[in-house]
Every structure is written in C-alpha cells, then in structure tokens.
C-alpha cells in the first residue's frame, strides 16, 4: 500500500492508522507561529464508527488504503441491517443501517448503491448523488411571487424536510442532492 506524508491527507481518504481503517472526515492544515506545520485530521473508524482527532506532521508517513468499489442493489432492511445484492454474482452483503447516517431515508427499494470493499469485507455504502422524491406537503403556489432567493419548506415522501422554490407544488417530483440534502431541480 502506498505511504503518503501527513500533509497530503485529504477528506475522503481511507488510511490505516494504529491497526485500524479510518476515513478522513475533516482536515485542517495548521501553521503555528512556533514549531512546524501539521494537519489536524478528524478520522472515523470504518468498522465501528468511532471518531478520533489526530495530528499528522509533514514528516509522518501514513498508509493510504484503496477500497474496491462495486455497484450493488438494495434489497431490504431487517433488524437495523441493510441487505445489498451484487447483480452479477447474486451474492448478498449486510451493512449496519447507521452507516448512511442522515441520508438513510433516501435509500429506496431496488436502488443501485456503491459499496466499498477492503479485501473481502464490505465497509461503506455511498448513495447516488441525486435521488428523485415526491413532495407530500408544502404551501400552495402563490402567483406573482418571485423565485429570487425565496424558498418554502416541503416534506418529502420519505419524511425528510427540504427547502424548495415557491413555484414547486404538492405532489410534484423533485430531484434532491443526497450529499447536501437540498433541492436540486424538478424531476
């Protein structure tokens, strides 16, 4: 596995540190007035979800891990576990539902999701960047209201609240960005 310097760590990188696999969530490069510069990195353990704040100096060497990514289909959820299937081999894999965090409501039956593997172990799941949802509750469209920077609250069919432009009405399909959890466009 390739080793990188501590100042080359970027958010989203997967690192092997203290015998565990960690994902870099947040990276701040700090240059104090006295002493050498360092990277303050917030890490999330890919196996148990625990968090760790660590300092890496530019001289520190860290192993960067490359995860294999496979597209798999979401089948169902049972007892807080999500079941995915490889559409070519029909192998099934289970992941903890907590792995998706706030984005869990956007997971739909039959959706293709990118599962990340380290050797033969499934560690992470990434939803598609854009998902289509139906608005079940919002204020009615008001004629003459401008769309410039005025948004109104709406409740989606999965229970998530988002802000939508005033011209979007109830029972309409919209596209939501799953990373920012914001309205992207009409479907």
Image (cartoon, grey):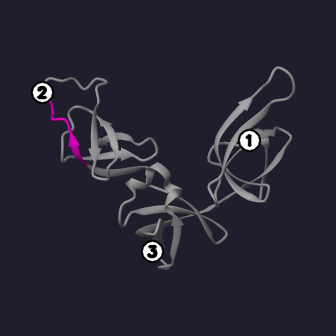
- Rendered position, 94 above or below 159: below
Mark 1 vs mark 2: in front: 2
Identify which residue, 12 or 141, lies in the foreground. 141
120 within the magenta span: no
Q: Which numbered tag is attached to residue 128?
A: none
Front-most of residues 8 and 137: 137
Q: Is mark 3 on a helix, strand or loop?
A: loop
Q: Tell whether label 3 touches label 2 (CB within 8 Å).
A: no
Tell me the quarter of the picture where residue 150 sits.
top left
Using residue 84 as the reference point, say whether residue 105 is left or right of it. left
| Residue plotted at (52% across, 73% down) | 93
Looking at the image, which residue sits at the far front?
A: 79
> Looking at the image, which residue sits at the far left?
143
Mark 1 residue crowding within 10 angstroms, few (<14) / some (14–19) / many (20+):
some
Label annotation for residue 143: 2
Residue under the point 14% across and 23% down: 144
Name the spot of residue 136 as percent of width and height, x first.
22, 48
Quadrant of the rendering where the N terminus is positioned: bottom right
Residue nearer the viewer, 80 or 24? 80
Instruction: Tell me where the magenta segment starts and ends, as one range.
Output: 135-142
Q: How far apart are marks 2 and 3 (CA)?
A: 48 Å
Q: Classify mark 2: helix, strand or loop.
A: loop
Compared to 36, does 109 lie above or below? below
23 with respect to 171 (left or right): right
Instruction: Give the residue number, with chain letter if any, for mark 3.
Output: 87
Few, some or many C-alpha atoms within 10 Å of disc 2 (few <14, some 14-19, many ≥20)?
A: few
Inspect the magenta stretch and tell me whether residue 136 lies in it. Answer: yes
State the image coordinates of residue 183 (x, y, percent, origin top left).
34, 40
Residue topped by disc 1: 8
The residue lying at 87 percent from left, 26 percent from top is: 35
């Amino acid at each position: 596995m390739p080793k990188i310097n501590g100042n080359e760590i970027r958010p989203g990188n997967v690192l092997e540190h203290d015998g565990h696999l960690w994902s870099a969530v947040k990276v701040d490069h700090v240059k104090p007035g006295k002493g050498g510069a360092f990277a303050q990195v917030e890490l999330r353990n890919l196996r148990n979800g625990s968090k760790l704040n660590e300092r890496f100096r530019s001289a520190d060497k860290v192993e960067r891990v490359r995860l294999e990514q496979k597209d798999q289909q979401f089948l169902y959820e049972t007892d807080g576990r999500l079941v995915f299937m490889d559409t070519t081999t029909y192998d099934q894999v289970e992941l903890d539902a907590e792995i998706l965090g706030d984005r869990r409501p956007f997971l739909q039956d039959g959706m293709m999701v990118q599962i990340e593997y380290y050797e033969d172990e499934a560690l992470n799941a990434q939803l598609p960047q854009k998902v289509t949802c139906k608005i079940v509750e919002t204020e009615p469209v008001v004629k003459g209201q401008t769309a410039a920077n005025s948004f109104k609250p709406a409740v989606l069919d999965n229970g998530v609240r988002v802000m939508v432009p005033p011209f979007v009405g109830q029972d309409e399909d919209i596209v939501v960005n799953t990373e920012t959890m914001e309205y992207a466009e009409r479907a």
